[in-house]
Image (tube, grey):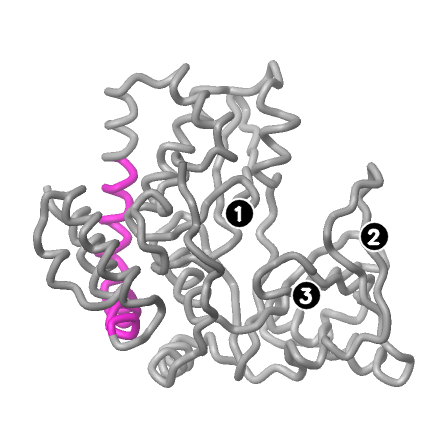
Amino acid sequence: MALISKKKIIYPISDGLRLFLQKYGREVDFPIHYHDLLRYSSSIPLYDYKDNDTLWETVFYAQSDREEIHYNVKKIYSLLKAEGDMSVMKHLYVDRIDLCVYGNTQPFRVRIVNRINDNFDYFYVKQADASRVYGLELEHLLSPNRISYFVHKNTLIEEHIAGIPGEQFMRQQINDPLLNPIRLAKEFVKFNERCFVRLLGDMHSSNFVVVVTPDFEETHYRIRAIDFDQQSYEAKKSIYLPQYFKQNNALIQLGIKHITPESMAQYQREERALIANRLKTSTVEIEDVLKTMENDTISTKENIDSLKKDLARHYKNDRFLNCTNMGQILRESLEQVLKK
């Protein structure tokens, strides 16, 4: 079982990371920041359609602030979706702004609604944490998924990643007779491998979603991370392997039942080959990320020393022992997939 050591430290955006974000168009001057949304005057608990407390609160702003705040968050949404073109936003309105009261960083979630057809979307306003920014960028470069996010000063804006929350999927759909257990188990193996190779930790069922895509003949599944706070931070290799979290037991048991060790090894090799291809096609961007991480502080010395020993034993590779920071450890981890 994987155990997170302590509450994670929030690391500020360093000058080097800021330069990286500017170079790749991730640093954008937007009109409202995390601390502006803290000016709410009241809040109420948010319940789901079954009257369960979601542990989010809907916040309300004084009349004098509300119009300006709602306009500015629509402006941010236009940056995420339409490169800042507000003309396409005229039919949209801010339906709700929620605050996550139980999270490490207490993010805000904005719900935007199209008044013509009631279609809605979300995005998040968070405190900028360097670990999370590196996690988002590595997800964008090394996974099958593209990620839209922006940073300005100490605020991070993230698009909503749609899918069925992992814990909900396992509770409600794991026993569905239409479920394809082999395909789902295969995807969990590949997700497990992706997280381990790029050192994304804490992927228990609350931190990923399951995307279900019906095809003409079969159903496809993809598991997507939605929380990137634990990028290259923790000390133990088990934290970077979703298979060690008890919250994921339903998916783990599915794999034990439906996948042979030979098949699992094949799926792991397939995923590593895909990551190797992405490394080769995004060489400049990944090199820039790694160099920036190597000159940044995103973990403690104790965590670094512990993880490099864990990975040196795992890969039987003493090169990990020469690493002095998480960027170097990640570089060495990625090197493993490039080896035949």
Residue matched to label 2: 117
| Residue 190 image offset from top left, x and y in percent | 36, 36
198 lies left or right of 311: right
Q: CA distance from mark 2 to mark 3?
A: 25 Å
Residue matched to label 3: 108
Sooner in the amino-acid sequence: mark 1 or mark 2: 2
| Residue 242 image offset from top left, x and y in percent | 41, 39
Q: CA distance from mark 1 to mark 2?
A: 30 Å
Q: Which residues are magenta?
A: 270-294
Quadrant where the N terminus sits is: top left
User: Mark 2 is on which residue type?
Assistant: Asn
Mark 3, residues whose alpha carbon is within 10 Å: few (<14), some, or many (≥20)? many
User: Mark 3 is on which residue type?
Assistant: Phe
Point out the frontmost of discs 1 and 2.
Answer: 1
Point out the frontmost of discs 2 and 3.
Answer: 3
Sooner in the amino-acid sequence: mark 3 or mark 1: 3
Q: Residue at x 77, y 79 (%)?
A: 39
Residue matched to label 1: 207
Farthest residue, direction right = 63
On whether residue 286 falls in the magenta region, the answer is: yes
User: Mark 1 is on which residue type?
Assistant: Asn
Q: CA distance from mark 3 to mark 1?
A: 16 Å
Q: Secondary structure at mark 3?
A: strand
